[in-house]
Image: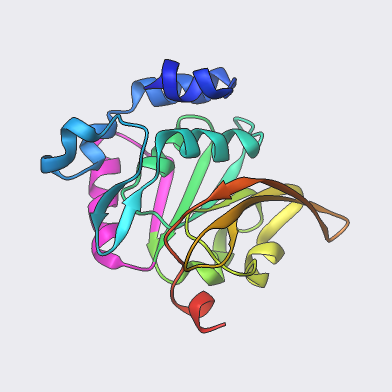
Amino acid sequence: MVEEQIAGRGVKDPRILDAMRKIPRHLFVHNSLKDKAYGDHPLPIGEGQTISQPYIVALMTEALKLNSSDRVLEIGTGSGYQAAVLAEIVKEVYTVEIRDSLRETADKMLDGLGYKNIKTKYGDGYDGWEQYAPFNAIIITASANHIPPPLIKQLKEGGRLIIPLGSTLYYQTLTLVTKKNNELDVEQMGGVAFVPMIGEAKRK
């Protein structure tokens, strides 16, 4: 998986490659899908949600240019796999999931694997996690047609945020923004297809 799908497609950060070699991805999917866990595609995890394609996990993580001392906010815990990748690289990971059954399952898995630097929360990711803000980086693993203003506010000056931005029904553009002088420098990274954010993001 790592050599062909990730390093072979241009991801270079050795910390990400090592993390994805180490983490048992098959534990984050349903038993009936374990034989497909290392394939180059997303997989369903229940409640209409998916575990992202390995390459996209690596690409989004690398784009954030993380440091070992960073505090990162993830919106959309899902299976917990992306949080585990982040936790191998940074000091603290805070992850919010609007579906409590998914959050509970992910929390148990991450705890069982020994991750002590991940905190999970049941709630609407649109609001972020103000208690632990500001964050060096924010990763949003569901699509929205705009960047939630609370997340921009909770991003540190110089911090990076990555989001699948655009139509939540079809395809989106993976968008990386850097906060500079309270303005956003925007870079588009190509087309993706993510499940949509719900809650406040859907209402707006």
Q: Position of residue 132 (x, y in %)?
A: 57, 58
Please state if 139 lies on the left or on the right of 180 as rendered: left
Magenta segment, which residues? 98-120
Q: Is residue 86 visible?
A: no
Q: Position of residue 8 (x, y in %)?
A: 51, 18
Taking the view exactly as shown, the residue that stands out farthest to the front is: 170
Residue 111 sits inside the magenta stretch: yes
Q: Quadrant of residue 130?
A: bottom right
User: Residue 66 versus residue 9: which sits nearer the camera?
Assistant: 9
> In the rendered view, would you say 128 is above or below 51?
below
User: Residue 78 versus residue 95: which sits nearer the camera?
Assistant: 78
Quadrant occupied by the N terminus? top left
Residue at image location 51% in from the left, 42% down from the top: 92
> In the rendered view, would you say 177 is above or below 117?
below
Residue at image location 24% in from the left, 43% down from the top: 109
Residue at image location 49% in from the left, 39% down from the top: 56
Q: Position of residue 185 (x, y in %)?
A: 81, 52
Residue 192 sits inside the magenta stretch: no
Residue at image location 25% in from the left, 58% down from the top: 104
